[in-house]
Amino acid sequence: MSSPADDRVSDRALVLYAFVRRASIEYAVGEFGHDPQRVGQAETARRETTHWLAREGLADAPTETERTLLEADSGTWPASAIADGMWRKEALGALLWALRHVEGLPAIDEEFEFSVLHERIERYGSVSAFRANGALREADELETAWREADTWLGATEGRGGDDATLASISAERARALAWVLDETGERPTA
């Protein structure tokens, strides 16, 4: 049986899943030059996501910024929001790892594959089954992963080239794992 902390982390993962999917759609709309047919398809997907979030009791779970972007008309996200949204897959992956839906974290210089994350959520067939099958890892394991990501972020933040990719990966993972540790009351003070 899942704990309240397991459920909160599961719900956050589901919101990030919806957000990353929407960012991917926004990227595709831009790649196709805002073709009216593609925008129409994106609008259908946006409405379906809104309905899904409401049906699963997650309508109030997105942050204010996430909510604003999720509710925005298709094809209107700024490029920076699309890029940030696409990087959220690293936070999603870290949460799925924290919940034991993913066996291991990729090396810090390797990105999560969204297709793998998608499968890890969808394989249960329902949100309730996804929630029921999530169980948080031990606090020391979460803290070790957070410290590694945070250390890499400190070493690469503000740099260019390959270091910029490392900074993006480590920032998303560190942020997500710090949030989990805060949710469980296990966040180290130093």
Image (cartoon, helix red, strand yellow):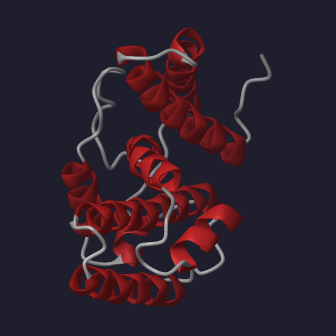
Q: Is residue 82 above or below residue 146?
A: below
Disc tally is: 0
Vertical arrangement, residue 133 with respect to residue 168, above or below = below
Q: Which residue is depicted at the point 55% across and 55% down? A: 9
Q: Which of 142 and 25 lies nearest the eye of the viewer?
A: 25
Residue 151 drawn at (x, y percent):
56, 13
Residue 75 lies, in percent from the top left, at 41, 73
Give the x, y percent position of residue 184. Answer: 67, 45
User: Can you name the residue that lies furthest to the top here?
Assistant: 155
- Name which quarter of the figure residue 132 lies in: bottom left
* Residue located 60% across and 37% down the image: 175
Query: Can residue 58 be seen in the rendering of this structure?
Result: no
Picture residue at 40% right of the left edge, 61% below the top: 23
Residue 80 relative to residue 112: left or right: right
Residue at image point 37% right, 86% down: 43
Q: Quadrant of residue 5?
A: bottom right
Which image quadrant for residue 128? bottom left
Towards the viewer: 19 or 4:
19
In the image shown, does 126 or 43 lie closer to the viewer?
43
Q: Relative to residue 119, is residue 40 drawn left or right?
A: right
Q: Residue at the right extreme? A: 189
Please state, as top left, top right, bottom left or bottom right, where the C terminus lies in the image. Answer: top right
- Can you say whether 71 is above or below 165 in the image? below
In front here: 121 or 20? 20
User: Can the viewer see residue 34 in this picture?
Assistant: yes
Q: Is residue 136 above or below residue 123?
A: above
